Every structure is written in C-alpha cells, then in structure tokens.
Amino acid sequence: MENNPLISVAIPAYNHGRFIRDCLVSVADQTYQNIELIVIDDGSKDDTADVIRSFIDEYEERFARVIFRSRSNRGVSATSNECLRLSQGQWVHLLGSDDLLAPDKVAIQWQMVQEWNTPDLGLIYSDAGFIDAEGQLLDRPVGSRPPPGPTKNGYRDLFLANRIPNPTVALRRDAFMAVGGFDESLFLEDWDCWLRLAAHYSIGRVPQVLAFYRYHAGNTHLRQAEMLEAMLISFGKFLNTEKDRLPAHVVSKNWRKNLHRLWRWARRSDPGSLPLLALSSLKGLAVLPDAEDYFRYAARIRRILDGKGEIRL
C-alpha cells in the first residue's frame, strides 16, 4: 500500500456557524498531511457559509485539494452522498459540522487499515469523547463496545445496537458507493447504511478516542419519534434483504427492544396502540417478526407525526 495516499475529509454543513470553524480547524490540525477537504453548505440560514469561506481563505494551502459548495437545502443524507461523490480519496472521513477530530485521527486510522490488511474492509471507526456547546469535555457513560479490530459479522451486533460514533467514521469510498450510499428518504440515515455495509464488508473498531461528538440544543437526537420511525424502517429493510444472515435470537431480541421503545413512545403520544403492542409482544414469543411488522409500526408513527390520527395495524 502507498504510505501517504490522498485521504478525504467530507463535511456536510447546516446552520452550524457557531461551531463550524472549530470543526474545520480540527481537520487542518491533523498530523496526517495528504488530505483533501470537501465541504458542502446545505442551504444554511445562518453565517455557516461565510465562516467556511473565511477558513478556506486562511487554510487552503494546508490541503492537497479543497472543494466548497453552497446550495439550497437537500438534507444531510443527500449532502453526505454528494460529499462522497466529490471525494477523490479511497478513504473518506465523514464529519458533522459541529463535531471535532482528535489531531491524530486520520493518521491512526490509516495506520490500522494497513496493519489489519483486510482487503474487504469497508468502514473503520473508533471511540468518541463528548463535548458541550462551549467545547468543554463531558463525562458521559459510553456503555459496552465491540471488540477491537476488524470483523466480518459486524451486522449482527449492529442489528442490536448502533455503537459506531458518527464523528469517528472513515468509509472506503468504493464500498460505500457499492451499497448505494445513504438512503435519502430516512431521517436517521447512518444506522441503515452501516448495516448494509457490514453485511457485505468487514468493519473495524480502533479502541481509542479519536473524535468528539458535540451535544447542543440543535442535535437531531432530540427528535426521538422521527428517529424511532427511521430505525424501524432500517431494520425492516435489512430483514427484507438479509434475514437469512441473522440468527433467530438476534431478530427476536431486536424486536423486543423495539417493542419496548414503541411502548414508551405510545404511552406519551399514541395510547391507542398499547393493546396492539401488547399483542405483538405476546405474538413475538412464538413467531419471529418479519419486515412488514417493522414497517407497520413505522407507518403508525408517521401517521401520528403528520396529525392524521389512527391507522389500523
């Protein structure tokens, strides 16, 4: 392998004028030198585009190549896909415009790609730290983590829990394109994409904190109902195409976890579905769910979110 290939850092940006300069500076401060920077402002309504232009004026010579586009809003999935299409590096580090990289993130992950020497590696990630809106470190529980190194069966763990911190991800560009990139119809696009990648490529974890996720009032994780809808659709899609890969106990455990999520949501937002959820729970003791079970509950959430009332399951 070439020791110092071009590596891309791709940033879809939206309304992060307060945070985007720190994000970009963390890319410029990488110890790895041969980096191209791809940034797309997705129709921000604040000064995000101006901050990006100012940064490029100051730092453009640091990068092997810089592309910046500012256009009307199309959403994070479409913008991320566009960033990946514009990238020329074989490996692309995809970074949210409010998050930060540790200075050696690109270098360490490239080193591990070489050391692992796993030809079908499609995604590499690491552990993440957490910061607040002011950039101060937060002490947050991280929970269990997958074993370090590459695995060919990462989809099994992913079907139960997404333990891939987004700011830490680097994607092999051709693998990402081969599985179709992000589904632009989903509110939560990453889990679906990681599942599809892990079904056809190895993925690998580096057990070091190499990026920082920023918690602030604009985080999409605060929109819990939309996230639950997207999760259910993602699991249904995966069962439609890859059910034979999954052991029965993994499918059953995933269904129980999602019924629990749905129960908590329904108690607040859709009490009429509680009897149906109880019935689904009893049914799940004897029969494995199929894709349509996930899609039906996702459709119910969408009906409630759209204010269209009840829907029969």
Image: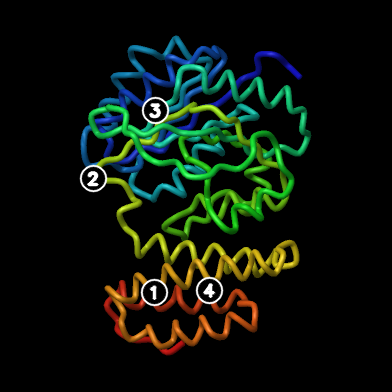
Q: Which residue is mark 1?
A: 263
Say which element carries label 3: strand
Q: Is residue 174 left or right of residue 69?
A: right
Q: Residue 77, percent across and down?
A: 46, 49
Residue under label 4, please give it: 294
Out of 163 and 101, give the one closest to the viewer. Answer: 163
Task: Say which residue appears at 31% left-offset and 43% top-offset.
Answer: 43
Identify the mark at residue 271; answer none if there is no mark.
none
User: CB atoms at circles 4 and 1 under 8 Å apart?
Assistant: no
Q: Amino acid at mark 2?
A: Ala
Q: Viewer-nearest of labels 4 and 1?
A: 1
User: According to the image, label 2 marks what residue?
Assistant: 217
Residue type at mark 3 is: Leu
Kindly identify the amino acid type of the residue bearing the numbered disc 1: Trp
How much space separates mark 1 and mark 2, taking CA atoms? 26 Å
Residue 281 position (above or below residue 17): below
User: What residue is disc 3 on?
Assistant: 100
User: Could you tell me which secondary element the residue under label 2 belongs to?
Assistant: loop
Mark 4: amino acid: Tyr
- Which of pointers 3 and 4 lies earlier in the amino acid sequence? 3
